[in-house]
Amino acid sequence: MLPMTSSSQLIEKAVEAFASLPGIGRKTALRLVLHLLKQEPGVTERFTRALLDMRMNIFQCRICHNLSDEETCRICSDPRRDHTIICVVESIRDLMAIEDTGQYRGSYHVLGGVISPMEGIGPDQLNISSLIKRIAESEIKEVIMAISPTIEGETTIFYLSQQLAPYGVLISTIARGVAFGGQLEYTDEITLARSILGRLPYSR
């Protein structure tokens, strides 16, 4: 509950809304709410409008499953990218982390997770069929497995390598500058860039 000095249910609802976001506790939520109250009404209107526009008008790229303002994301529609290389990532946050390095100029494919029998996540729950379709219908030369080096990640890489074997594409993994058991999105940019540049052929 809010401190006794506050008797506003409107503030309470706003705090609850902010506190429902990951990584934001009630104290931080209250601080954000009080900050917005100090601003001109137009500031709050622009803030809420931006959130609504994002929520209502965002697309999932029909090719790679990245988030986009259009049906096809900027990366997939950019003719300057090397579309013969696909970097397979677990999440959109991993895609953003690799893009931030500025060292990769190919395309991506977002799986939406990794195979995890313990959590009931199998291949059918991931964007694997669309990846296979892309490779079957396009001239793909290399598939980079940029998946977090965990047990589940290794299981996913092994499964994908088996599914892609008939297509004769080079399958590589990012170099092990990324510690086993670590999360890709939390890896620093220099280490992640070196891992992409120093990728290795994957052997089953």
Image (cartoon, grey):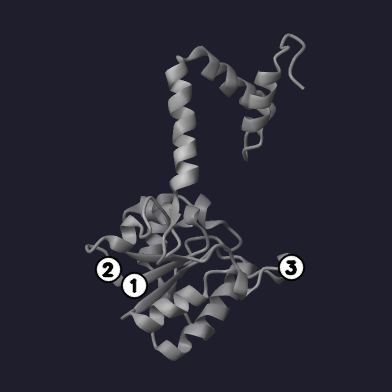
Which amino acid lies under the numbered mark 1 shown in the image of this protein?
Answer: Ile
Q: Quadrant of residue 193?
A: bottom left
The answer to which of 183 and 92 lies nearer the viewer is 92
Residue placed furthest toward the left = 80
Q: Is residue 105 above or below residue 128?
A: above
User: Residue at (32%, 54%) from the top-left corner?
Assistant: 102
Q: Taking 91 as reference, is 118 left or right?
A: right
Q: Amino acid at mark 2?
A: Asp
Instruction: Report crowding for label 3: few under 14, some 14 to 19, many 20 or more residues within 10 A (C-alpha).
Output: few
Q: Please tell me whether residue 108 is drawn above or below residue 27 in the rendered image.
A: below
Q: Which mark is residue 85?
A: 1
Q: In the rendering, at what x and y percent does residue 84 appear?
A: 30, 74
Identify whether 164 is placed above or below 65: below
Question: Dots 1 and 2: beta carbons under 8 Å?
Answer: yes
Q: CA distance from mark 1 to mark 3?
A: 32 Å
Between 185 and 5, the residue placed more toward the observer is 5
Q: CA distance from mark 2 to mark 3?
A: 36 Å
Image label count:
3
Quadrant position of the N terminus in the picture: top right
- Mark 2 highlights which residue? 82
User: Residue 4: horizontal and vertical position, in percent?
Assistant: 77, 11
Amino acid type, mark 3: Met
Q: Could you tell me residue 15's position as x and y percent? A: 65, 25
Horizontally, residue 43 falls left or right of residue 126, namely left
From the viewer's side, name the closer residue of 137 and 194: 137
Task: Identify the element where label 2 is drawn.
Answer: strand
Labelled disc at residue 118 = 3
